[in-house]
Image: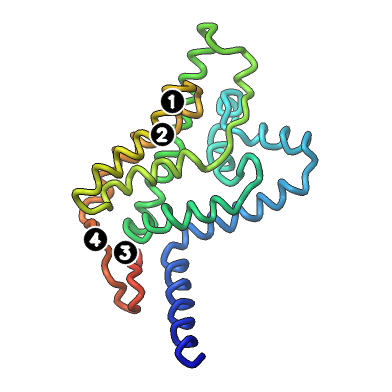
């Protein structure tokens, strides 16, 4: 028991450092928890109407683009929070540790906004040319997956050589296969977010590939700079 307690304390300290050194990731995750609880308290009909009003669909983007681009990133369609807690810890937190909060947030914003505008722009073209129904202007499009796809992609530059190429291949296959098979506007948005994440290479310069030890702990967590 005496030998276990110091190990437990070190694990707790490492966990605290991991979370506090990625404040953007875990504040965002906390906000998603609150909004997910709120969704569970809504009736199904009210939930659908509410999410549609806060969706980055063509109608909302044409009337209040700034609001919906921001607000849509704080709701999860389907209301399941736990998987995102895992995904944020696996992808967003390491990216924020590595890039620092400001650069990480830049990747998140570029992927979320850029992929949204690309996918909705293509959907708008499809509507105008009769390839999609007019009702698609009000389609439901909220969530954090575009930002997540962009961060997953930018982490390619974090993976040590030669493993960065298999990692990149896996990312392209994972996000490219649904686009080829389904060809939906959301699949296009995910793949566009991947390309945007890869295009964020200039934001990674000077950050290196290997994780450095934090100067205050022996946990191996690098605090953002």
Residue that carries the numbered disc 1 in the rendered image: 179
Looking at the rendered structure, the secondary structure element under dot 2 is helix
Residue 212 is labelled as none
Residue 175: numbered disc: 2
Picture coordinates of residue 111, whole percent (x, y): 41, 39
Q: Secondary structure at mark 4?
A: loop
Q: Quadrant of residue 98?
A: bottom left
Q: Nearer the viewer, residue 67 or 171?
A: 171
Dot 1 falls on a residue whose secondary structure is helix
Q: Which residue is mark 3?
A: 225
Nearer the observer: mark 1 or 3; the answer is 1
Cα distance in 3D space between marks 1 and 4? 32 Å
Instruction: Tell whether label 2 touches label 3 (CB within 8 Å).
Output: no
Give the vertical position of 214 relative to 109 (above or below).
below
The answer for how far apart the CA atoms under marks 1 and 2 are is 7 Å
Going from N to C along the chain, the mark reached first, 4 or 2, is: 2
Q: Which residue sits at x=37%, y=36%?
A: 194
* Label whose residue precedes the other's in the sequence (3 or 4): 4
Q: CA distance from mark 4 to mark 2?
A: 26 Å
Residue position marked by numbered label 4 in the rendering:
210
Q: Earlier in the sequence, mark 3 or mark 2?
A: 2
Tag 1–tag 2 contact (CB < 8 Å):
yes
């Amino acid at each position: 028991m005496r030998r276990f307690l110091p190990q437990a304390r070190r694990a707790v300290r490492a966990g605290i450092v991991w979370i506090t050194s990625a404040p953007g990731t875990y504040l965002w995750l906390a906000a998603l928890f609150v909004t997910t609880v709120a969704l569970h308290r809504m009736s199904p009909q009210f939930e659908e109407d509410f999410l549609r009003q806060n969706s980055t669909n063509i109608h909302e983007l044409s009337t209040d683009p700034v609001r919906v681009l921001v607000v849509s990133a704080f709701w999860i369609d389907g209301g399941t929070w736990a998987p995102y807690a895992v995904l944020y810890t696996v992808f967003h937190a390491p990216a924020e540790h590595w890039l620092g909060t400001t650069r990480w947030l830049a990747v998140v914003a570029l992927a979320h906004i850029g992929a949204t505008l690309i996918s909705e722009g293509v959907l708008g073209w499809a509507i105008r040319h009769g390839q999609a129904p007019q009702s698609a202007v009000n389609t439901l499009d909220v969530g954090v997956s575009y930002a997540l796809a962009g961060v997953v992609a930018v982490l390619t530059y974090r993976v040590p050589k030669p493993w960065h190429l298999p990692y990149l291949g896996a990312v392209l296959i994972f996000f490219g296969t649904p686009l080829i098979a389904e060809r939906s506007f959301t699949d296009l948005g995910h793949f566009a977010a991947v390309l945007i994440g890869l295009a964020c290479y200039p934001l990674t310069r000077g950050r290196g590939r290997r994780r450095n030890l934090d100067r205050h702990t022996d946990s191996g967590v690098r605090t953002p700079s």
